[in-house]
Image (cartoon, rainbow, N blue to C red):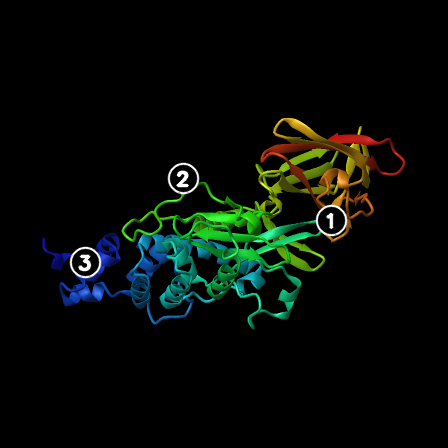
Amino acid sequence: MGLDSVGDLALNIILTKLGPKETAKVSSVSKRFKDLASEESLWSLFCLRDLDLSAPLDHHGNPLPSFKATYKLWREAFCMYPWSLVKRVKSCWDRLNSWFTTNFPEVKATLGRGASEGEIQELERILKVKLPLPTRLLYRFHDGQNLTGENLNTDAADCLLGLIGGYCFYDHLVNVYLLPLHEVILETREIVRHLDLPNGSQFIVVAASSSYIGKFFFLNCSDGQLYVGTQNLLTIGEMIPCVPQTLISPVHDFNIDQQQDAMLLWLEEHGHRLHNGMIKLRDEGNIKSISLFPEESPLCSTAVTNGVKVRASAIFVPEAVDLSRKYLFAYSIRMSLPPEGCIINGMRFSSCQLHLRHWVIRADDTVVSNVNSEAVIGKTASGESAHDLTESNGFCAEHGLAIFPLLLPGEKEFVYESCTPLRSPTGSVEGSFTFVPGSGMEVKSFEFL
């Protein structure tokens, strides 16, 4: 039986199995095959399967006349890159764009149009570096963030628009954004020349905090590792790697399909945490931002005692670290009551108020601080603050009033953040809160960590 006797539907199924490259070859066999290989339904399937495109769009989001033209343009636009890497980088950006479109459109509006190969080559010429392939592709899709452009509306003035996000405790505010190529050039020229780096080092600045706190991320273009600067960045060039080196694979070989640098791994993990709710959008006092304090297990501890729910998580603060003397950790505590209120020994109370706290802080397995004090000390999500030199160990020098949060059934969580320095990179915090349920009742102590 020849192919002439095979029906169009069967041939269409065969072409879908062959894939785009072989389908293009088959189209030269005969007019019939050329017509079958030009079917829009076939190329829409290829676009959906390879690029997750349900509409004919180019990589800038511009409409195109057909799915066949779309697939052809994508292959031509990225012909110098491994196709599997192109698909992976697109998937990374699609995941981030999807989350921001739904949850934080003000950030999506700051994303720059994809850079051209010429613009990337100009950066490489000026800074005398060769960008890793994954990072080149990341910039081909979006040229960082523009935090001052005309695309920002008035609502964005009340937001911290860093794509990566950040944290705040006391007066330490961090909100990290991705630098566009022109800022990469400016910041790299300004900062790297002050650093004590070996000759020939290929470090560039790719992300930074938009706040007054100096937090900078550096990409080593030679091996694809991402670093974050410490407190000693400008004095001795001290940095900390962000990704285990074993996860990074060759980043300059166009013939290998499995390139991954730390920049791509970082953004993929960030997108994963946003989508699974590990990190979330915080909207307090009409100011929105992405909070990097984890809010889901296993990176967030949760306990419920007599109806009082307490959640606790911590993050490493590298920009305030001196690796020879101290490691700084910030922590976030969230307290709430369920709609049924506080229940103790069968008695129901419509409120409870924090009275005392007890903290045991360890560096490795050694107790370095044992705090018994009234109320909580730190900066609340609404911006109120109180400072305690016992817990912060001199990190913050201000003093203020302690906070005694009153928890009411079903109301929004009370949130506060603080910090503690340790002399080692590992440690723990455990303790208890003492609440006064209702009014004038006996004080109860609830262990939560």
Q: Residue furthest right?
A: 440
Using the image, tell me which numbered label, if any, was put on residue 240: none
Earlier in the chain: of badge 2 and badge 1, it is: 2
Question: Is residue 72 left or right of 31 when viewed as pictured?
Answer: right
Identify which residue is drawn at 63% across, 55% down.
Answer: 213
Residue 350 in the image: x percent, y percent? 82, 41
- Label 1, label 3: how many angstroms apart (C-alpha)? 69 Å
Residue pointed to by mark 1:
380
Identify which residue is drawn at 70% across, 38% down.
Answer: 310
Residue 351 in the image: x percent, y percent? 81, 41
Q: Residues within 10 Å of mark 2 (few under 14, many from 20)?
A: few
- Amino acid on which disc 1 is placed: Thr
**Depicted 62 relative to depicted 54: above or below:** below
**Depicted 310 relative to depicted 28: above or below:** above
Q: Residues within 10 Å of mark 3 (few under 14, many from 20)?
A: few
Q: Secondary structure at mark 3?
A: loop
CB atoms of marks 1 and 3 within 8 Å: no
Q: Quadrant of residue 394?
A: top right
**Depicted 192 relative to depicted 431: above or below:** below
Q: Nearer the viewer, mark 1 or mark 3?
A: 1
- Amino acid on which disc 3 is placed: Gly
Question: Is residue 136 left or right of 289 when viewed as pictured?
Answer: left
Q: Nearer the viewer, residue 36 or 322?
A: 322
Residue pointed to by mark 3:
7
Q: Residue furthest left?
A: 1
- Label 2, label 1: how many angstroms apart (C-alpha)? 39 Å
Using the image, tell me which numbered label, if any, was put on residue 246: 2
